[in-house]
Amino acid sequence: MPSVGTLAFDEFGRPVIILKGQDSKKRLFGIEAHKSHILAGKAVADTLKTSLGPRGMDKCMVSPDGDITITNDGATILSMMHVENEIGKLLVQLSKSQDDEIGDGTTGVVVLAGALLEHAEALLDKGIHPIRIADGYELAAKIALEHLDKIAEAYPLDLAKLDPLVNTAMTTLGSKIVNRCQRQMAEIAVNAIMNVADMERRDVNFELIKVQGKVGGRLEDTLLVKGVVVDKTFSHPQMPKEVRNAKIAILTCPFEPPKPKTKHKLDITNVEDYKKLREYEKEKFTEMIKSIKDSGANLVICQWGFDDEANHLLLSHDLPAVRWVGGPEIELIAIATGGRIVPRFQELTAEKLGHAGHIRELDFGTTSDHMLCIEECKKSNTCTIFVRGGNKMIVEEAKRALHDALCVVRNLVRDNRIVYGGGASEISCAIEVAKEANKIATIEQYAIRAFADALESVPLALAENSGYSPIKTVSDIKAQQIGQNSSRLGVDCLNKGTCDMKEQSVIETLIGKRQQISLATQLVRMILKIDDIRLPGESEE
Amino acid sequence: MRGDLTTALNPIPLYKQGGGEEKGEMARLSAFAGALAVGDLIKSTLGPKGMDKILQCNMSGGPDAGKLLVTNDGATILSKIGVDNPVAKVLVDISKVQDDEIGDGTTSVVVLASELLRETENLISQKIHPQIIISGWRKATQEAVRSLETVTKNNSLNVEQFKNDLMNIARTTLSSKILQGKKDYFAKLCVDAVLKLHGKTDLQSIQIIKRLGNNMSDSYLEEGFLLEKRIGINMPKRIENARILIANTPMDTDKIKIFGSRVRVDSVAKVAELELAEKEKMKDKVDKILKHGCNVFINRQLIYDYPDQLFAEKGVMAIEHADFEGVERLAQVLGGEIISTFDTPDKARLGKCKLIEEIMIGEDKVIKFSGVGQGEACTIVLRGATQQILDEAERSIHDVLCVLSQTVKEPRICYGGGAAEMLMANAVSQLAEKTPGKESIAIESFSRALRQLPTIIADNAGYDSSELISNLRAAHASNKSTFDMENGTIADMAQLGILESFHLKKQVVISAAEAAEMVLRIDNIIRAPPRPRQRDMRNH
């Protein structure tokens, strides 16, 4: 009875208690533990499988509070599934780390891991030791990665010609609901990245790209603002709604009389004191306004609120002002406009002002919502992608899709080597790995062959989701790849009439693919090495 | 062997207790069930002869606990019913967005989306892949919008004609609401109000005042502006050629705002002195205000007795506690500035109006500002027999105002009464004939769904819909016509003057298709376990 745990018996047949509460604890070990892990892993992968590829389906997630998320992004699905199984949780983390590192291919990595586990099960049934399987997978992954490097092509990265980049972004967006305006979204993503990319360091600072959503309008209304969009409005309804050639004072001090940080008491004991204080207070306000006026600013952005009086004083001195702007936003504004964040009125000088060519207020629909749009900034690195859409779920999903597209373009900027998508690179790797397998003398041979089979699971799932007969499609492509000795042939998901992924310009980044294979292999190795699992019993909860 | 058995009998739990997933067909089934239920629920309110719904708010808690609501506004109904089905929530969401964006067509958008999904049920059972249906729908949506665009008219250059169009649109929108009895009257009222905005879509400056009592036809548009406030005691109740200072300043006790200050005295005499000083400060303030040369003073905050009295002495009308929106609207109407400091009287811009007086509406006194200059704001006074009628009237007026203001922005118009839908349906079904492949079936289904809208309208009016719709379809091949709701016949909408905003119709089709597509793409519903505290709430 291995599942309950080992019980030692003494000569009278009484059980010897070795571990505390051992009869109530659940324990799985040996081959059974492996089987249970594999089952759980497969279950998670199966859920995600239908979301793979441009014809993949969406999942509808109901959160604990009853809110709805509809998405097709692997990492999002998994993180919101609230998986309880331990192995399931490992897969969730796998997809998350792919998301953090690469940003795309989060579904593919889980599907691959699931397939590897599935094939491991067959090997276990043959009686091969899990460690040997794990070692075989490791070896196979190495072969696959080397092969990937071989078939990878350097991609022309030309600032004048962004078309190739747009194509890559379009591949990523193809599987999302936003594919209705795929081209536009892809262009937005590429332009955003190119706007902030540091070509010398070959890096992209994501902090400079903000993705903001607002429900309403259509997806087609999504636009890229080369500047900052803040969900705030001018503090006084009668301030001008549009400022040109703005010189911006960015303040983190409130428009209020100063507050010493130390605790103090100010006692008013007679009428003179009272009057003096009154004068002092008035003076302070005028002083503040004066210091801003003197610095030459014509727009004030403040992290804190203003007093009514200050508000009016600002208005009467033609100083449009924005209050309660949050910390990260104020930083963004500062970076975009080249201004310095000023913590005290005394320190405000002309050099510390930010500059922006055009600031205007945007109105939406009938709900009298306003947003502030700061454009034509002096150091126009920062940009904001402003997403519109028919409803909240679409906006959220579009934001996620854009994030993926941004990540892919960034990866290309970092490393411009690419492989072809649509399952082409997986099939090519599978052929190579299977070929190499025959050269291995030890039992690992079987594991390596299994790895090759598992690699094919991605094109299989793609074909299945696209409504083709999966086995036939994949075997056709495989035969063609070997026949033409070309690694560019993949599954023609959109029925365009050609299997050549270069012609369809279905492109994925090399680092993304590499990361998928190595992460999935690592995780499967780890799972295979677990042979014992202990759970606290029900009674202990 | 024993071990295998235990594994088989103990399925590995993947989700936490209470969570779970519905897959493939099951998920689709529950998705469609939810969407159809919502669609059927709201279907009967569509069209000029649509019925109303009574909604009773939850008795426990909330600001409107136990309140009764009678409405036929789709967005209002859906927002109050509190659905649990995830897909139903998607539909509720689109109706809300439609409300925010356009203000009307909230019922149509939900009905169209649910009809689209109803069609899908058939297609799925014919083993057509959802993705193929979606790509068919996208083509159909494009074609529908394109065909709609070809029949739109733009009369915005001709002012008279445009005003006439606006009247017609307002009348069309009103005809499905409670105000239909007086629709000419209210249409004029709304058009006048919207034209005052000069193309802005911000409806904040149109104030709606509801007062119980009297007849609905006693409602009117106040040319000037009404403020629901009282004039202070002992002050003039009527001022001609008023110069108005609009302020936002504390007039109760003008506190010293320096942090940590407090009064500490050692004798009663000093308290008295300080009190005097405070009074003096207030008097200073009042004097400064008076220096502006105003004879009316309106403050957003409270005015205490002492300054009130000071104003009364000088014969200045002081109005306290005008809420924020009121003050902003006033500033807009009167062309004044909202002022908080009073040291520079020459710079401050005062508001002006010819006459301020206190008038009675029903039993309440309000202050009326008449003879205002170019004011953009205005007030609509609604009267009605019960609170429910008033509330519903307000919602209707709001819908009309929204539609009108959007029409002013995007002046293209098209025909209502199901004509536009029929036109789109015909164009789409022509496209289906031309399209090869399975997509054609999906496109055909789209046109069937579009045709459902006039069918439902006819059904709601109690006519023989199948007869009417087929007649209509036949008639549509030659000219733009649809049925007359009064007589149950087919008529020319251009003659009847039933117009709708193109923007509205377009948005209905696009958002409905978008939502239906989103629902269709779902093949898996994953439920997280509900938060335990929710269960506790229910036990209370």
Image (cartoon, coloured by chain):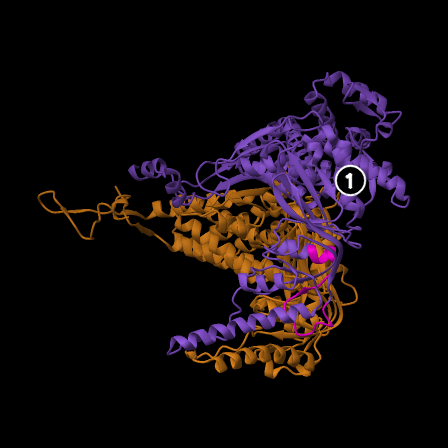
Camera-side residue of B516 and B475: B475
Residue A466 in sight here? no
Label 1 Cα crowd, 10 Å radius (few <14 / some 14-19 / many 20+): some
| Image coordinates for residue A515, horizontal then vertical, percent | 55, 60
Q: Which residue is mark 1?
A: B142
Residue B213 in sight here? yes
Camera-side residue of A541 and B172: B172
Q: Is residue B213 left or right of residue B159?
A: left
Q: Is residue B342 magenta?
A: yes
| Image coordinates for residue A528, horizontal then vertical, percent | 41, 53
Camera-side residue of B492 and A388: B492
| Image coordinates for residue B127, horizontal then vertical, percent | 64, 29
Q: Which SS type dominates the magenta stretch?
A: loop
Amino acid type at image mark 1 = Gln
- In the picture as drawn, the residue positioned furthest to the left comes out as A12
- Mark 1 belongs to which subunit? B
Q: Is residue B307 left or right of residue B478?
A: left
Which segment did they paint magenta? B330-348
Residue B505, located in which quarter of the rendered image? top right
Element under disc 1: helix
Q: Is residue A245 magenta?
A: no
Q: Is residue A217 left or right of residue A332?
A: right
Camera-side residue of B3 and B444: B444
- In the picture as drawn, the residue positioned furthest to the right comes out as B158
**Number of dots carrying numbers:** 1
Chain that is orange in the image: A
Instruction: Name which residue lies at 44% across and 56% down.
Output: A525
| Image coordinates for residue A441, horizontal then vertical, percent | 47, 56
